[in-house]
Amino acid sequence: MRRIHILLAVQSFVAILVSFNRLGTWTLGYVLPNQFLRWVDFNNMLVFPLISLVAFYLLKKTIEYDSPQREGRLHMTVNLVFMIGIYLLAASYGDHEVTNYLHIRFCLNDSSSDLCRIIIFNDDEFGHWVFFTGFVMMNAALLFLQNIFPRKAELSKKDVGLLVFNSLFLGAGILANLGFEPIELDLYIVALLAIISAYFLGKRGKQPLFVYYTSAYWFGLIASLIAQALR
């Protein structure tokens, strides 16, 4: 459980960093003199996703243990979903962050040209679709892996408390990114994952990822909806 707590804490910490990176002004400077990207785009495309994906992979390996299930078709299928999700996330970051930078720099005031129309579509539509597909696949795969490889020992009250406390930081990251802008696809994606995690929690009981994700997603979702209602 110590390793699980640490790896989930990394995910929560990254969610907070992404919020500061996205909403702050300290990352708006250019990475190089040729101005190919701002630091906000560079961090979102390379720094934070790499940290998050390494933690996700180590979490996956921590959950899995020797069992007949390891050789089963279900495990192989979930692993494939996890790998495809990683690929789609990586592709989405490469597409979205670059076009978001170009959109803001060159197309905010004049979106009529064919070039700007293509840039805006990749930024606002296609990049988001690919990202959310990968995001759902990877996070759902982790929940299914926890279902395939349930922790045998019962969680202590201390572990449950640490999981819930840790999840609040991820929930706060969700609130920072979803609570103060017009409702788009991202809020429905969080709602979908909140329902999946709550389903597994009700079906299989207090497993580490079920507790963490149910608490994080429902807190983030409810807080975001309240913030939207108060806008």
Image (cartoon, rainbow, N blue to C red):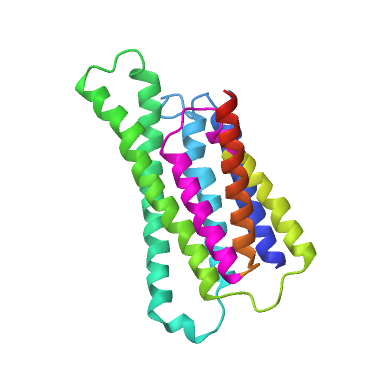
- Relative horizontal placement of residue 194, taking residue 223 as reference (left or right): left
Instruction: Please count the marks in the image.
Output: 0
When the figure is inspected, residue 227 is found, relative to residue 6, above or below; the finding is: above
- Relative horizontal placement of residue 208, taking residue 157 as reference (left or right): left
Location of residue 78 in the rendering, given as x and y in whole percent from the top left corner: 42, 69
When the figure is inspected, residue 48 is found, relative to residue 85, above or below; the finding is: above
Bounds of the magenta span?
Answer: 175-204
- Quadrant location, the C terminus: top right
When the figure is inspected, residue 90 is found, relative to residue 225, above or below; the finding is: below
- Quadrant location, the N terminus: bottom right
Which residue reaches farthest bottom? 68
Location of residue 196 in the rendering, given as x and y in whole percent from the top left corner: 50, 58
Camera-side residue: 74 or 28? 74
- Relative horizontal placement of residue 8, taking residue 182 as reference (left or right): right
Q: Main secondary structure of the magenta part?
A: helix
The residue depicted at 50 percent of the width and 27 percent of the height is: 181
- Relative horizontal placement of residue 120, taking residue 12 as reference (left or right): left
Camera-side residue: 34 or 99? 99
Location of residue 120 in the rendering, given as x and y in whole percent from the top left corner: 31, 27
Camera-side residue: 71 or 101? 71
Location of residue 212 in the rendering, given as x and y in whole percent from the top left corner: 63, 57
Residue 26 falls in image quadrant: top right
The residue depicted at 59 percent of the width and 48 percent of the height is: 218
Which residue reaches farthest top? 109
The residue depicted at 62 percent of the width and 50 percent of the height is: 216
Residue 25 falls in image quadrant: top right
The residue depicted at 66 percent of the width and 64 percent of the height is: 4
Which residue reaches farthest right? 158
Residue 95 covered by magenta stretch: no
